[in-house]
Image: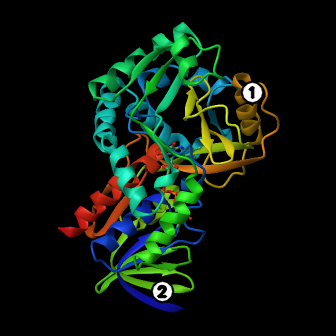
Amino acid sequence: MRGISTDIAVVGGGVIGLAIALRLRADGREVVVIEPNEPGSGASYGNAGTVANYAVIPVGTPSVLRNFLSLLLDSSSPLAVRTSALPTLFPWLARFAYESLPHRYRQNASRIAELVSDAASAWTEFASEIGASSFLSAKGCLYLYETRKAFQAAGADIELRRNHGVSQQLLSAGDVAKLEPRLTGFEGGLFFPEAINLSDPGEVMRLLASGVKRAGAEFVQASVKSIVRERSGLHIAASPYDVRARTVVIAAGAHSRQLAASLGDEVQLDTERGYHIEYDMTALPVERPVCPTAHGFYFCPMRGRLRVAGLVELGGLTAPANSQLTEALARNARRVFPELGAPSRSWLGFRPSMPNSVPVIRPSKAGRDVILAFGHGHIGLTLAPRTARLVSAMLAT
Ligand SMILES: Cc1cc2nc3c(=O)[nH]c(=O)nc-3n(C[C@H](O)[C@H](O)[C@H](O)COP(=O)(O)OP(=O)(O)OC[C@H]3O[C@@H](n4cnc5c(N)ncnc54)[C@H](O)[C@@H]3O)c2cc1C
């Protein structure tokens, strides 16, 4: 075993762990990042790239709760559950149902709204710090509604966003065509003019990891097996390393639950599995992230390719990718752009998801020497700079 000792160990090198490590180095703290894989190669690699400062609506809403069964039974809906995972999922689903009740949904939206409010400016500053400004695009994001009924059904969410000061514009079919001339056949849309997006989250993760190294953090390539609180500090077993730290930040994304539980924090974290397919192309059909809301994915303009990213599959961390879901993504993508051929590649990733869609960013109940920073669900990319600032403030006091 190789012994390492440090002030702060960050467990997990996704966008959350890396952003925290960068911030803590800026605070002058000694930092070791423990990550078994290429940093930034988990959920942080394959997402839709939106800095979604408008995404205040939690996944669980009264409407999702009302329609949950029909969504599950409809093979073209964005939601799927692996039946073999149902017994394990049951407590999470029960909590999700509770969190979807009207009073909880509104409270959860308020908490999320507070977190995402400054995401665009925070990301602009963060991208400049890591040399990634050229990967930011500021053309807003667009939701599309196929039918008048779907548009009307979105009314409650639109109002809740308005109450939280989200900048949004209702668009007619003609307005949609002015913004994105290749899009036809939609009843209307909703435009979020202040949203920004990343044109290549994977490249941005590489720049972020290099920035963290340049800032002086050490990287340890290993998987953390256990964290034990001892008199002299925290002992982290990450074979072949034996790391001792005064403080540990658990930022292992969807894999954080057991690590937190071993230190006494029972957290209802599970995963919403998400997928993307990509089409290599130079002339992209959209200029900004566009979400046909009935299908639950985004068309994402990326450098040299179109990424189609989204879906929610409840089914745990170990089952292989479900090819029926990537086929459904391709089929639904062709409904909008019939000229799309076969995808060039596909990807499965694990969103770290809480039943209320609110991330866990707080000290452990057992002591302030452990900080929990996970559970960012659909908005982890968006919230990375904010999470880093919150953790830095917790460790400064
Ligand atoms: C299809 C899809 C689309 C999305 N679109 C968006 C979007 O447009 N905007 C947005 O804001 N968010 C989006 N998200 C969500 C976002 O990608 C995640 O919330 C975010 O990446 C979570 O970051 P993380 O660092 O917590 O997790 P991860 O990126 O998964 O990183 C966790 C890291 O911890 C490591 N790890 C795991 N176990 C251990 C261990 N025992 N020891 C050490 N390290 C460990 C893993 O190897 C991994 O690198 C999307 C997600 C998906 C799947």
The CA distance from mark 1 to mark 2 is 51 Å
Is residue 81 something one can see in this rendering?
yes
Q: Residue at x 38, y 38 (%)?
A: 53
Q: Residue at x 53, y 7 (%)?
A: 148
Inspect the image, locate mark 1, and give the three-letter code of the amino acid beneath it.
Arg
Is 234 placed left or right of 1 in the picture? Answer: left
- In the rendered image, the quadrant that contains the N terminus is bottom right
Instruction: Give SS at disc 1.
Output: helix
The residue nearer to you, when weighing 13 against 129, is: 129
CB within 8 Å, label 1 to label 2: no
Is residue 263 something one can see in this rendering?
no
Q: Is mark 2 within 8 Å of ligand 1?
A: no
Can you say whether 256 is above or below 47 in the image? below
Instruction: Give SS at disc 2.
Output: strand
Can you say whether 9 is above or below 120 in the image? below
Q: Residue at x 45, y 25 (%)?
A: 191
Q: Position of residue 263 (x, y in %)?
A: 37, 68
Q: Earlier in the sequence, mark 1 or mark 2?
A: 2
Q: Residue at x 50, y 71 (%)?
A: 210
Dot 1 corresponds to which residue? Answer: 334
The residue nearer to you, when weighing 205 against 131, is: 131
Dot 2 corresponds to which residue? Answer: 242
Extreme-left residue of the structure = 397
Question: Crowding near pointer 1: few (<14 within 10 Å), some, many (20+)?
Answer: some
- Asked which quadrant contains residue 62, the reply is top left
Extreme-right residue of the structure = 342
- In the rendered image, the quadrant that contains the C terminus is bottom left
Extreme-top residue of the structure = 148
Q: Is mark 1 within 8 Å of ligand 1?
A: no
